[in-house]
Amino acid sequence: LEVARDFRPDILVVDLVLRGSKIDGFELARLVREDAALGDVSLVASTGLTRPSDRMRAQHLGFDHYFVKPADPDQLLKLIDEVLCRR
């Protein structure tokens, strides 16, 4: 979160299960969406979680896109291009 505040990215690709971290990707999304400085960042979930409830939770917390691992690199690059072109 601190790095994102300093860097101000256009897009964040976040794993929902952040092993070894104090928070998970769901909590990170909530914190990003509450931060006025990061309000316009596009959030992309990259995860092995495949339950509909996980997808719904991610959407509810502010993720704009949801990729199940292994994500197709071409689809991910296409999405990044689309996000950057809109900015």
Image (cartoon, grey):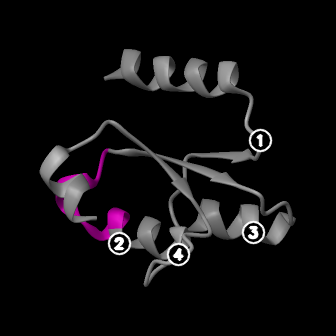
**The N terminus lies in which quarter of the figure?**
bottom left
Tell me the residue at 28%/40% (across/down). Answer: 9
Q: Amino acid at mark 3?
A: Asp
Q: Amino acid at mark 4?
A: Asp
Disc on the earlier residue, 4 or 2: 4
Instruction: State the separation of the CA atoms marked 1 and 3.
Output: 16 Å
Q: Is residue 14 above or below residue 7?
A: below
Q: Nearer the viewer, residue 29 or 14?
A: 14
Q: Nearer the viewer, mark 4 or mark 2?
A: 4
Instruction: State the separation of the CA atoms marked 2 and 3.
Output: 18 Å
Question: Which residue is label 3 attached to?
Answer: 54
Disc on the earlier residue, 3 or 4: 4
SS category of the residue bearing label 3: helix
Tell me the residue at 78%/63% (across/down). Answer: 49
Q: Amino acid at mark 1?
A: Pro
SS category of the residue bearing label 2: helix
SS category of the residue bearing label 1: loop
Q: Nearer the viewer, mark 1 or mark 3?
A: 1
- Residue 51 lies in the magenta-colored region: no
**The C terminus lies in which quarter of the figure?**
top left
Among all residues in the image, which is located at the extreme right? 51
